[in-house]
Amino acid sequence: MFYKKICLIISVLVFSFTALAQKPAWTDYYKRQNMYPEDQYLVGFVSGVNTNDEEAGKLKSVYEAMAKDKLIQMIQVEIETNN
């Protein structure tokens, strides 16, 4: 009986903490645009859903590479030569 009460209390605490968890502001597109305006920051943001049950580490690497590619595409360089 004592162990059941302890398990119940622990379960309630765990679920209450997850209920209080909030999404970070940068995950919302409009909040991210306000926090990091495009005229001041270079932002490469990629998101997706793991529909094929791929390994999380591999998927993270793929999305990081995609975000880096977005950043690289935003940078433009002009080169002038004086001859």
Image (cartoon, rainbow, N blue to C red):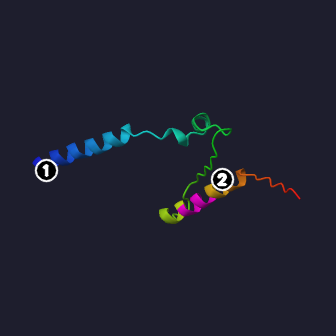
Question: Is residue 1 in sight in this rendering?
Answer: no
Image quarter where the C terminus lies is bottom right
Counting the numbered discs, the total is: 2
Q: Is residue 72 magenta?
A: no
Distance between the Cα atoms at labels 1 and 2? Answer: 54 Å
Q: Residue at x 51, y 63 (%)?
A: 53
Q: Residues within 10 Å of mark 1 (few under 14, many from 20)?
A: few
> What predominant SS class does the magenta segment belong to?
helix
15 is higher (above) or lower (below) than 81: above
78 vs 43, left or right, is right
* Residue found at the very far front of the displayed protein: 83
* Residue highlighted by disc 1: 3
Residue 69 shows which numbered tag?
none
The secondary element bearing badge 1 is classed as helix
Amino acid type assigned to the residue bearing label 1 in the image: Tyr
Q: Residues within 10 Å of mark 2 (few under 14, many from 20)?
A: some
Specify which label sits upstream in the sequence, 1 or 2: 1
**In x, y percent, where is residue 71?**
66, 53
Q: Which residues are magenta?
A: 61-66
Q: Is residue 62 magenta?
A: yes
3 vs 83, left or right, is left
**Is 19 in front, or is 34?**
34
The secondary element bearing badge 2 is classed as helix
**Is 37 in front, or is 1?**
37
* Image quadrant assignment for residue 9: top left
Question: Is residue 19 in sight in this rendering?
Answer: yes
Q: Residue at x 63, y 42 (%)?
A: 41
**Is 14 in front, or is 2?**
14
41 vs 74, left or right, is left
64 vs 81, left or right, is left
**Is 17 in front, or is 34?**
34
Q: Residue at x 61, y 35 (%)?
A: 30
